[in-house]
Image (cartoon, rainbow, N blue to C red):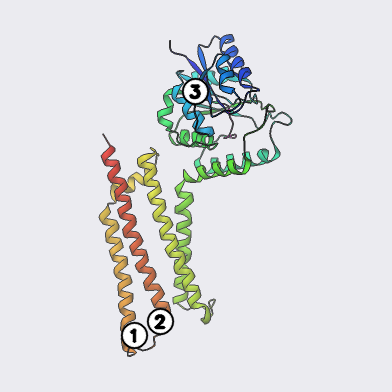
């Protein structure tokens, strides 16, 4: 018989608490008349946690690949309920909150996330986490236009038919951030439920700096515009401005600093163009492989083709070669002797390098596009 609610609990060496977690979950389901199951994912425990969970009545899934995300991916894969409630195995969350999460799903929500930040019991959250969690949550909200105040809460619920839409991939603690980002990008109905956070039983498996970095990493990776395009545009603009000022001999650059300033300007131009190319490729990858809702990129893709990029690359490359021709002409006029035209040589090399970057980026974007067209029905 199909279960209506699946309670999925990841477990790594939680022998002190796992049996009680299973018992509490089963009791809540029975008391509220919710037909369901309790799934425990044994993530490589060495203290017999899996056997204790099985004895308490849970369906135990063995997942030897360590990681918070790995455990949940394994548990979500076998969960049979229409509604899936995710909760940690350290008794930090009250299992009696399960019906509230299910109620939100029954009333149209597709993802429900707990919010612990207003009800943290003494000793339940270290000071570093109290400071870091709002910062990371706020940064995620700004970059991805979400409104979830406690992105990393370990108690949440999701409709099982939304799992293919979410297409979750990360294997560590960043799994929590990825779920919110993906749900927002797919325009799912995401809601928050205020809950209490209690002191955990047993030793914490969290590593604040490592896990914080993993969350930050996935926040950035899912926003190539902020990670690549904006810095690229800033560097391209700044480099172009510096280069222009050098060639018009603006007094703020001393004559002895012209070459050094030009090198800096040209370096920024090259790095900027490279970052923009990487950003466009990342957005293309997101559109084609992560089902990212990127209407702007799709519109550009419909109007621009490989040939446009190649033509632009050839024009820029030709301009660079023309500068080389001018340089050779000046050298010839000096009888092929000593020629002090460092600025022109640096500019010519930069323009040629930019043309090459545009050329290769255009083909990379085309390769990604070919894969998309092959996969389309």
Q: Earlier in the sequence, mark 3 or mark 1?
A: 3
**Quadrant assignment for the N terminus:** top left
Return the residue nearer the eye: 227 or 14: 14
For disc 1, the marked residue is 331
Compute the Cα span from label 3 to label 1.
Answer: 75 Å
What residue is drawn where x is 67% and y is 38%? 130
Mark 1 lies on a secondary structure that is helix
What residue is drawn where x is 52% and y is 78%? 257
Q: Which of marks 2 and 3 is nearer the N terminus?
A: 3
For disc 3, the marked residue is 61
What residue is drawn where x is 68% and y is 34%? 125
Q: Residue 159: where, in percent of width, then height?
A: 46, 23
Marker disc for residue 341: 2
Answer above or below: position of 42 versus 151.
above
How many residues crowd mark 1 within 10 Å: few (<14), some (14–19), many (20+)? some
Q: Does the magenta stretch include residue 218?
A: no
Q: Does the magenta stretch include residue 154?
A: yes
The secondary structure that dominates the magenta segment is loop
Q: Residue 264: where, in percent of width, then height?
A: 49, 69
Compute the Cα span from label 2 to label 3.
Answer: 70 Å
Compute the Cα span from label 2 to label 1.
Answer: 9 Å
Quadrant in the picture for residue 360: bottom left
Return the residue nearer the eye: 24 or 357: 24
**Quadrant assignment for the C terminus:** top left
Residue extending farthest to the bottom is: 335
Tell me which segment is drawn in magenta.
149-155
């Amino acid at each position: 018989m199909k279960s209506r609610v699946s309670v999925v609990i990841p477990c790594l060496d939680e022998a002190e608490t796992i049996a009680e977690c299973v018992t509490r979950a089963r009791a809540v389901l029975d008391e509220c008349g919710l037909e369901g199951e309790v799934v425990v994912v044994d993530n490589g425990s060495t203290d017999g946690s899996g056997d204790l969970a099985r004895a308490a009545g849970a369906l135990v899934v063995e997942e030897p690949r360590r990681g918070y995300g790995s455990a949940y991916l394994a548990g979500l894969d076998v969960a049979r309920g229409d509604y899936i409630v995710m909760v940690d195995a350290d008794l930090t969350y009250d299992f009696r909150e399960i019906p509230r999460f299910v109620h939100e799903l029954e009333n149209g929500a597709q993802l429900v996330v707990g919010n612990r930040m207003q009800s943290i019991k003494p000793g339940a959250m270290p000071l570093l986490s109290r400071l870091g969690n709002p910062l990371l949550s706020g940064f995620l909200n700004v970059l991805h236009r979400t409104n979830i105040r406690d992105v990393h809460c370990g108690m949440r619920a999701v409709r099982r038919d939304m799992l293919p839409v979410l297409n979750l991939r990360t294997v560590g603690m960043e799994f929590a951030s990825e779920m919110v980002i993906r749900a927002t990008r797919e325009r799912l109905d995401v809601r928050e439920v205020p809950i209490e956070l209690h002191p955990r039983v047993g030793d914490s498996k969290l590593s604040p700096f490592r896990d914080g970095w993993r969350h930050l990493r996935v926040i950035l990776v899912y926003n190539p515009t902020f990670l690549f395009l904006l810095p690229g545009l800033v560097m391209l603009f700044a480099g172009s401005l510096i280069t222009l000022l050098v060639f018009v001999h603006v007094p703020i650059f001393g004559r002895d600093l012209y070459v050094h300033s030009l090198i800096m300007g040209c370096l920024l131009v090259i790095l900027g163009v490279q970052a923009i190319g990487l950003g466009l490729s990342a957005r293309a990858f997101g559109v084609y492989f992560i089902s990212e809702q990127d209407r702007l990129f799709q519109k550009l893709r419909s109007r621009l083709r490989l040939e446009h990029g190649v033509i632009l690359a050839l024009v820029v490359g030709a301009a660079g070669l023309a500068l080389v021709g001018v340089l050779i002409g000046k050298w010839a006029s000096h009888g092929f002797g000593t020629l002090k035209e460092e600025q022109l040589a640096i500019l010519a090399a930069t323009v040629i390098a930019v043309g090459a970057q545009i050329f290769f980026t255009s083909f990379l974007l085309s390769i990604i596009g070919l894969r998309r067209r092959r996969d389309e029905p």
